[in-house]
Amino acid sequence: MAKKWGQQIKSWMTKQMELPQDVMMDLPRITMVGQLHIYIENHRGLIAFSDKELRLLLKQGQLLVKGKAFVIKTILPEEILLEGKIEQVIYLNDDK
């Protein structure tokens, strides 16, 4: 219950102070350039990588990117830049 209240307070503060939701609510920020690049900020770590799939841990759930010829161009603790042909970006909920 306290966790739900905390999220409601963060949401209210974000709206009142006009702050970016991704910063205040610990959400990922995903920027795509066509089907060629995807830049993901505010993730919690790399779970799996192949030339056809990237799976990242988020605060709540996971992010799955599917495609072809994937190459990680940049990887930092909370940021990743992926190149290749991006076909799907799927958010997987954490069923807790």
Image (cartoon, rainbow, N blue to C red):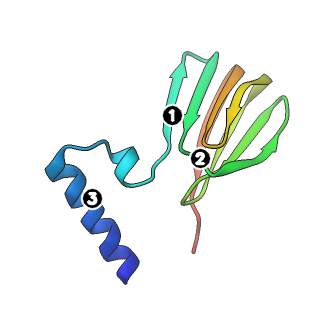
Q: Label 2, secondary structure: give it.
A: loop
Q: Which of 85 and 55 is in front in this view?
A: 55
* Three-letter code for the amino acid on which mark 3 is drawn: Ser
* Three-letter code for the amino acid on which mark 1 is drawn: Ile
> Residues at badges 1 and 3 in contact (C-beta under 8 Å)?
no
In this rendering, the count of numbered labels is 3
Mark 2 crowd level (few <14, some 14–19, many ≥20, 10 Å Cα): many
| Gap in angstroms between the C-alphas marked 1 and 3 | 20 Å
Residue 13 position, x and y percent, is 21, 57
> Residues at badges 1 and 2 in contact (C-beta under 8 Å)?
no
Report which residue position mark 3 lands on. 11
Q: Is residue 29 above or below residue 87?
A: below
The quarter in which the C terminus is drawn is bottom right
Residue 1 position, x and y percent, is 37, 84
Which image quadrant for residue 55? top right
Residue 21 position, x and y percent, is 33, 47
